[in-house]
């Protein structure tokens, strides 16, 4: 689980000096940069961009198609026109950057967004308008949210620069409790009392605020955060999309196998899902009975040291899908954010 951190240890210093890449960087047919206007505007205004001098994070509200993009140390930006124009979401007070593909967490039913940055405090909105700070659990890599609660009070996070230290809050971030152990690699929340996690091989489950854990499955998720839609949990893995219909007690592979590391991203319903893996954006419209290539991955080549075949565990790369506009997005830390219209 620490491959990304070990491989990159020797590249960070050099990467910090890298200039912001052009929006016209060769990323493959149909992929086009959408972030350069925002980056150029900030530089012209004399704003100091953080690590990488560019964007680091992208996500989509599946119910509206609105795009949210993180600019390193310069906030969360929103677009309602497929990335043609962006406006700063000032209320979010979003600092830092999204270091993983699971640092932006969206309520699949719409409006709710949580941001779990490194080197800054996280923030959350449940209505898409009013934001609040998530307190100070420390720099975070990713987090899971109980979106079944209208107030989203239960939040489960993995702390940055740790092997796998996790914290839990039951009051929306006012107070955080450190959980025992340092091996939390993947996190999930079904409700205020039901947590699941990847801790080595398999899935474990807790119903007492993370105090004790029981084995739930020998299947191992690769996705860092569980997706929950209408009470059913979905977790990507090498074997396929893992699904639980009983709040994590039992798990099975949804339909046919598909290797994936990012997602799931939901379409119009639970049968329509996109995941991302070595083959690209893979799509099913029939609950996994068939999987088809929906879009290729952008090819950044050697332009970005954070992009490579070894990076298959959700770090540094962010992907998103707008099922309304039929658009795919990619953001790689230290590079531009890109759009692929199908």
Image: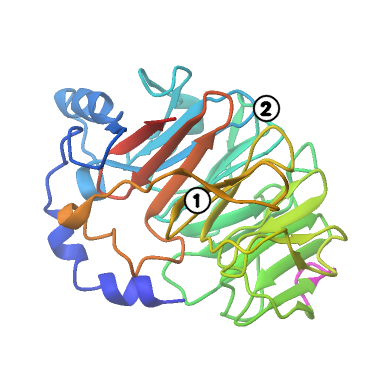
Quadrant of the rendered image containing residue 201: bottom right
Q: Residue at x 50, y 32 (%)?
A: 92
Instruction: Give residue 284's mark.
Output: none
Q: Is residue 188 left or right of residue 310?
A: right
Quadrant of the rendered image containing residue 12: bottom left
- In the rendered image, the vertical position of residue 82 relative to residue 246, given as above or below: above
Magenta stretch, main secondary structure, is loop
Q: Which residues are magenta?
A: 206-211
Q: Are dots 2 and 1 in contact, CB under 8 Å?
A: no
Q: Is residue 216 left or right of residue 198?
A: right
Q: Residue at x 77, y 76 (%)?
A: 211
Q: Residue at x 12, y 45 (%)?
A: 19
Residue sticking out furthest to the right: 246
Q: Tell whether position 49 is magenta.
A: no
- In the rendered image, the vertical position of residue 182 relative to residue 124, given as above or below: below
Q: Which residue is mark 1?
A: 103
Query: The residue tagged with tag 2: helix, strand or loop?
Result: loop
Query: The residue tagged with tag 1: helix, strand or loop?
Result: loop
Foreground of the two, 200 or 171: 200
Q: Residues within 10 Å of mark 1 (few under 14, many from 20)?
A: many
- In the rendered image, the vertical position of residue 73 relative to residue 254, given as above or below: above
Instruction: Give residue 127's mark.
Output: 2
Q: Position of residue 166 (x, y in %)?
A: 60, 69
Q: Residues within 10 Å of mark 2 (few under 14, many from 20)?
A: some
Decide if residue 169 is in sight here: no
Q: Is residue 170 left or right of residue 173?
A: right
Q: Position of residue 255 (x, y in %)?
A: 72, 58
The quarter of the image holding the C terminus is: top left
């Amino acid at each position: 689980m620490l491959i990304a951190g070990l491989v990159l240890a020797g590249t960070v210093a050099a990467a910090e000096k890298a200039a912001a890449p052009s929006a016209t960087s060769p990323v493959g047919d149909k992929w086009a940069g959408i972030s350069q206007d925002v980056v150029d505007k900030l530089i012209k205004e004399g704003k100091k961009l953080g690590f990488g001098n560019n964007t680091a994070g992208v996500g989509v509200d599946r119910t509206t198609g609105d795009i949210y993009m993180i600019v390193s140390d310069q906030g969360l930006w929103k677009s309602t026109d497929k990335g043609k124009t962006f406006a700063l979401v000032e209320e979010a007070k979003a600092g830092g950057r999204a270091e993983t593909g699971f640092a932006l967490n969206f309520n699949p039913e719409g409006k709710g967004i949580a941001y779990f940055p490194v080197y800054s405090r996280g923030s959350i909105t449940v209505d898409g308008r009013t934001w609040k700070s998530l307190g100070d659990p420390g720099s975070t890599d990713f987090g899971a949210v109980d979106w079944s609660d209208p107030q989203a009070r239960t939040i489960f996070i993995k702390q940055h620069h740790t092997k796998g230290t996790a914290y839990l809050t039951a009051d929306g971030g006012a107070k955080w409790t450190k959980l025992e152990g340092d091996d939390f690699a993947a996190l999930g929340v079904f409700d205020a009392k039901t947590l699941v996690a990847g801790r080595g091989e398999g899935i474990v489950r807790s119903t007492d605020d993370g105090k004790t854990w029981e084995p739930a499955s020998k299947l191992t998720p690769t996705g860092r955060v569980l997706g929950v839609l209408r009470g059913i949990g979905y977790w990507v893995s090498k074997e396929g999309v893992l699904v639980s219909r009983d709040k994590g007690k039992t798990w099975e592979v949804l339909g046919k196998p598909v290797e994936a590391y990012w997602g799931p991203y939901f379409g119009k319903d639970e049968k329509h899902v996109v995941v991302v893996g070595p083959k690209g954006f893979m799509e099913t419209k029939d609950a996994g009975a068939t999987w088809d290539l929906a879009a290729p991955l952008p090819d950044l080549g050697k332009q970005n040291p954070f992009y490579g075949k070894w990076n298959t565990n959700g770090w540094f790369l962010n992907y998103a899908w707008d099922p309304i506009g039929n658009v795919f997005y990619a953001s790689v830390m230290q590079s531009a954010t890109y759009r692929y219209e199908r």
